[in-house]
Image (cartoon, rainbow, N blue to C red):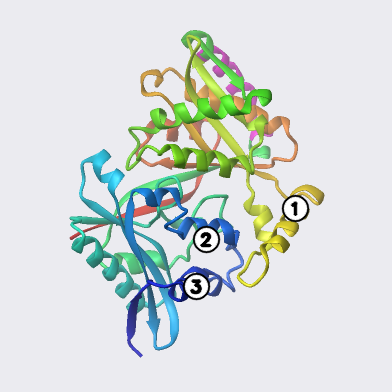
Amino acid sequence: MGITIRKVETSADFKPFFEFSWTLYKDDPNWVPPLLSMRREQFDKQKGPAWEYLEGDYFTAWRDDKLVGTISAYINHRHNEFHNEHIGWFGAFEVYDDAEAAAALLNTAADWVKAHGGSLIRGPQTFTTHEETGLLVDGFERPILLMPYNPPYYEKHILAAGYTPVMDTYSFYIGRKDVQETGLFERLERVTHSIMKRSRITIRPVERKNMKQEFDLFKELYNAAWEKNWSFVPMTPRELDGMVKSLGQFFDPDLAFFGYVNDVPAGFIMGVPDFNEVLYRARAKPGTPEIITLLKALYFWKIRPVIDTARVPLMGVKEEYRKKGLDAAMYFYLLRALMNNPIYLHSDSGWILSTNDTMVSISLNFGSRIYRTYRYYDRAL
């Protein structure tokens, strides 16, 4: 009844690795099944754009003939070049509440990274900061679009395997009632107008007739605005195109703005409808043709709409234009757009680094509260 670790090498090996989440979370009322096609592209080394510079392997843990866990171990060569580090990562970590299986998986990933020249392993991350990143350590409710979800017991197994916390990120919540019942909006409006006048800031919405040019501007600003973020690696052109394509499926032009200082493009903010509310009801699963899932999704998206939450996944300001209040001004414009659309009752902003004092302060001052925390762990090798 011991644990056996197997490397995923064939399509026959890949199938149980890929499908394990549906088995693990089958009785979890909060888990949101992803679309099979999106999940497959993420793990397909021939299709996932990040695999142009990642090197890694997938592993499964078995107790006799029962699959009990999965993990990936990989080197992000662009990360190491950009940050001048020699580290590796673990991701795709899913396991039953089984200490032996968890330890075997986490040790396997550490051994793999060490064998490939890494001096430290970090995670969980599947597979970059632009995808599923961090371990959920509080706020174990239905996950927001593009954010990770896991059972509470994962942390104890990661700590037991010799990993130590290295960084937290936060998600902030604010509801329509929080804004309406406190007079917060009017106060923020006065402060925002004062900031904009003082720093010569202008904010404009996305121009619907010029979406290609608008997305080109977004891509230009994205890498520059996020460059100094902890563990950030600039996106490749293919990754940026992939992000635009992915977000474009859920994009609401009313929730995207560009910020200018002295008429120079300096920042952006983008909110998106929480499509997880649709996917939660569509219930994708292996063996069900995706066209059926997509028809269900269409029903809950357009015919009987269920989305009442927006997520703010992207905001950035070029370094030379920070500390001028541009981030606060853009945040106010997005808040106003959400308030003007009665379908949005809730808003999630995340993730924000716990060490980003400016954004944490802005979020709190705007009436938001921290309601979920995600954590990264390191283990020296």
Mark 3 → mark 1, Cα distance in angstroms: 27 Å
For residue 32, say whether it is visible. no
Question: Is 74 a magenta residue?
Answer: no
Left or right of 5 in this view: 83: left
Farthest-out residue, bottom: 1
Amino acid type indicated by mark 3: Lys
Question: What residue does disc 1 label?
Answer: 298
From the top left corner, tell me how far across and down residue 262 is, in percent.
48, 9
Quadrant location, the N terminus: bottom left
Q: Quadrant of residue 248?
A: top right
Mark 1 → mark 2, Cα distance in angstroms: 21 Å
Q: Residues within 10 Å of mark 3 (few under 14, many from 20)?
A: few
Mark 3 and mark 1 lie on one chain; the one further toward the N terminus is 3
Q: Nearer the viewer, mark 3 or mark 1?
A: 3
Q: Nearer the viewer, mark 1 or mark 2?
A: 2
Question: What residue does disc 3 label?
Answer: 15
Amino acid type indicated by mark 1: Leu
Amino acid type indicated by mark 2: Arg
For residue 363, say whether it is visible. yes
- How many tags in the picture? 3
Question: Is 189 a magenta residue?
Answer: yes
For the residue labelled by badge 3, is the local secondary structure a helix, a strand or a loop?
Answer: helix
